[in-house]
Image (cartoon, helix red, strand yellow):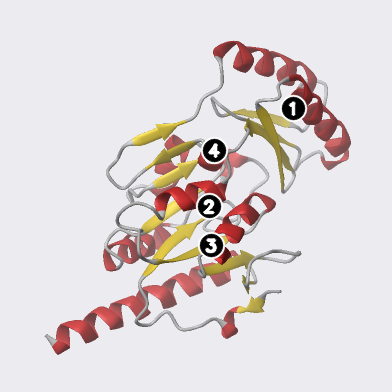
Amino acid sequence: MTRESEGFPSLSGGLYAFFFDVDGTLAAIKPRPDEVSIPASVRRTLQSLSALSHGAVALISGRPVEQLDGLAAPFHAPLAGVHGAERRDATGELHRISLPDEVVKQLHETLSSNINNWPGTQLETKGMAFALHYRQAEHYQPQILQLAESMVKRFPMLALQPGKCVVELKPKGIDKGAAIRAFMQEAPFAGRIPLFIGDDLTDEAGFRVVNAMNGLSVKVGEGSSDARFRLKDVDEVYSWLEQMKLQLDQDNLGKESRL
């Protein structure tokens, strides 16, 4: 059961690790993935939050790492892309899980030939994963799901991940929860309290991991969720980001005044 933002515990004095989904959380959802952007003011806030938390800020997204860097620039942070199939740690080392080349080739050929028959749908290729978008053609949702399920049966190394007007095919065993767990075992995240904000079904695995660590899980928007807290929309996320930054800033000033 989730609680609204006014019921959140104070972050003052706490040592937190911050994890953020991107689409629908830090950026408003658009009809096409390439139309999405993170406002410059939000990127500056993330940069400040990272400095105040000694680098314990990471983006956790279904997008590839390269796209995340472009969306967040000039903010440069640890990232988990493609739901954790790609992960760049705080040292800059990139950890990547891939599919066999022949599997990628067969998937691309089959998915492309089908998608071309459904106007308004879009195939997004991510290297080791594929996203089938139907936001502009929601009536094709049953066909999209059936196609994705047939690919999972054909290639047992794959897992199906549904989201908001999208179905993704990704390597089995990869999810945002596993990515957060990996970060929490490394500096500068280790020993901190995890806080994860997300909006979609793909974020639920992250919420469950954060809950198990007695952290703060925050769902953006409506719908059932394992998250313990809730923010109404992207604008409310932006307001809360500012509050978090101010709170950490005040904590640091208080520490300096006592020295």
Q: CA distance from mark 1 to mark 4?
A: 17 Å
Kindly identify the residue that appears in the image at 42 percent across and 46 percent down.
79
Where residue 257 appears, as percent x and y from the top left, is 16, 88
Where residue 128 appears, as percent x and y from the top left, is 56, 26
| Residue, disc 3 | 210
Where residue 206 appears, as percent x and y from the top left, is 57, 55
Split into 4 quadrants, where in the image is the N terminus? bottom right
Of 58 and 44, the residue lying toward us: 58
Tag 4's secondary structure? helix
Neighbour tally class for label 1: few under 14, some 14-19, many 20 plus, Cα within 10 Å: some
Q: CA distance from mark 2 to mark 4?
A: 12 Å
Of 37 and 98, the residue lying toward us: 98
| Residue, disc 4 | 82
**Dot in front, 2 or 4:** 4
Looking at the image, tell me whether mark 3 or mark 2 is earlier in sequence order.
2
| Residue, disc 2 | 22
| Residue, disc 1 | 152
- Disc ID at residue 219: none
Kindly identify the residue that appears in the image at 55 percent across and 51 percent down.
177
Query: In the figure, residue 144 lies in which quadrant?
Result: top right
Looking at the image, tell me whether mark 4 or mark 3 is earlier in sequence order.
4
Tag 3's secondary structure? helix
Looking at the image, tell me whether mark 1 or mark 3 is earlier in sequence order.
1
Mark 1 near mark 3, Cβ–Cβ under 8 Å?
no
Looking at the image, tell me whether mark 1 or mark 2 is earlier in sequence order.
2
Mark 1: which amino acid? Answer: Val
**Dot in front, 4 or 3:** 3
Mark 4: which amino acid? Answer: Val
